[in-house]
Image (cartoon, rainbow, N blue to C red):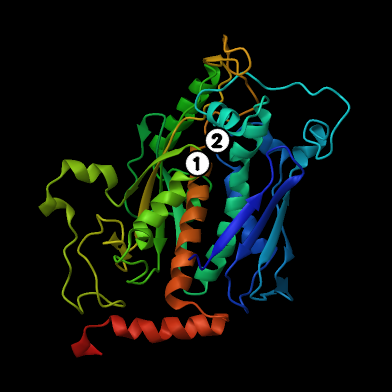
Amino acid sequence: MSHFRFLTAGESHGKGLTMVVEGLPAGLPLSEEDIARDLRRRQGGYGRGGRMKIESDHAEIKGGVRHGLTLGSPIALWIENRDWVNWTEQMAVEPVVAEIERVTRLRPGHADLAGAVKYGFDDVRNVLERASARETAARVAVGGVAKRLLAEFGVEFHSHTLALGGVRSNAGPLVDWEALEEDPVRCGDPAASKAMVAAIDDAKHLGDTLGGEVEVRVSGIPLGLGSYVHWDRKLDGRIAQAICSINAFKGVGFGYGFEGTNLRGSQVHDVILPVGQWDGMPWRHATNNHGGIEGGMSTGETIVVRCAVKPIPTLAHPLPSVDLETGEEVLAHYERSDVCVVPAAGVVAEAMVAIILADAWLEKFGGDTLAEVRRNVESYLPTLAPRALR
């Protein structure tokens, strides 16, 4: 059973996106500005398309908050699609008299073929509007709510670009996060950043797209979130499912991730340090190659999630494809798109990790009020010390 859950509704060119968030305790300070920062970050990044010049995403709180505090009831959020004014007839809720041109040219790499056949549509727009990555704006808004809860307990979220278009960052473990947000591709390696920008320019000139890899880091999560007792309670499994549910995300690793497959066990596993060798939390490791999760549970180290993002499949120079109605060969349908979304993808990945961690946090420390959750956290943390030191 989920303790923090959400639903979204809405289409890419419809009136807007609706979100309903359930599970927050009463008494949590929450404002629209708490959500706005990440929505702005999602719209940035070099290589974004024309849609981001139209939209100015803002999540309006429609319910569940009074006088700046959550009520413990579901929270309703709304993001207006400013591009709706250009699609009022094509995306009207009511039947229209005018003949609307159908989309039948299938796009490789999208949900077009499977979605249209599965649901019996003769117009691919019925699929592409909901399958669009526009829905990730809703997830980022919900992630902002989850982050607000976890911020009460000192949890911090960051992300950066590890690779893009075949260029890999050599940024070390220490990243200037404020400076990173000013970088056009959100990369902590200036030389790699310039090469990534050049790669995006080259792909745009060729009518092509680029993918890459992003990393999410979360600090402040104590030991013990998640569980080893059932497959669906394992923290890394829950995070992996959430990440792979994001458009264009095709792989997930923790800590070393896939790189660890080339090393021996003696090089990979995180040695546990004697108690008292570190300040703060009693249990620490010499390394964090497993990304802060072992056996399906958080270890108290920084959670590190690495995510593979495929190139956007909507190409300015379309690939060969097939017409849904006739089965004949055609060029794939093209609709305004990005060249590269990797810098923004890190923000979306942060949001989904935050949603899972908020759920796991409330599973472990849940209560009806923020004060009750805080008491549960404060009573748990002293139990982490070895028995002889309690």
**Residue at 40 percent of width and 86 percent of height:** 379
Disc number lying in front (2 or 1):
1
Q: Nearer the viewer, residue 324 or 287?
A: 324
Q: Nearer the viewer, residue 38 or 133?
A: 133
Q: Position of residue 22 (x, y in %)?
A: 60, 66
Side (left or right) of 261 relative to 235: left
Side (left or right) of 331 relative to 99: left
Question: Mark 2, residues whose alpha carbon is within 10 Å: few (<14), some, or many (≥20)?
Answer: many
Q: Which residue is mark 2?
A: 46
Question: Looking at the image, is 113 positioned above or below residue 131?
Answer: above
Instruction: Say whether residue 154 is visible.
Output: no
Q: Considering the numbered disc 1 on the image, is that residue within a helix, a strand or a loop?
A: helix
Question: Looking at the image, is 183 positioned above or below residue 205?
Answer: below
Side (left or right) of 184 relative to 40: left
Q: Considering the numbered disc 2 on the image, is that residue within a helix, a strand or a loop?
A: loop
Q: Are marks 2 and 1 in contact (CB under 8 Å)?
A: yes
Q: Which residue is mark 1?
A: 343
Q: Position of residue 208 (x, y in %)?
A: 51, 21
Q: Amino acid at mark 2?
A: Tyr
Question: Looking at the image, is 55 positioned above or below residue 148?
Answer: above
Q: Position of residue 325 (x, y in %)?
A: 63, 16
Q: Which image quarter holds the C terminus?
A: bottom left
Q: Amino acid at mark 1?
A: Pro
**Residue at 32 percent of width and 63 percent of height:** 230
Q: Nearer the viewer, residue 95 or 201?
A: 95
Quote the CA–CA distance across marks 2 and 1: 7 Å
Which of the 4 image quarters holds residue 225?
bottom left
Question: Looking at the image, is 333 positioned above or below residue 110?
Answer: above
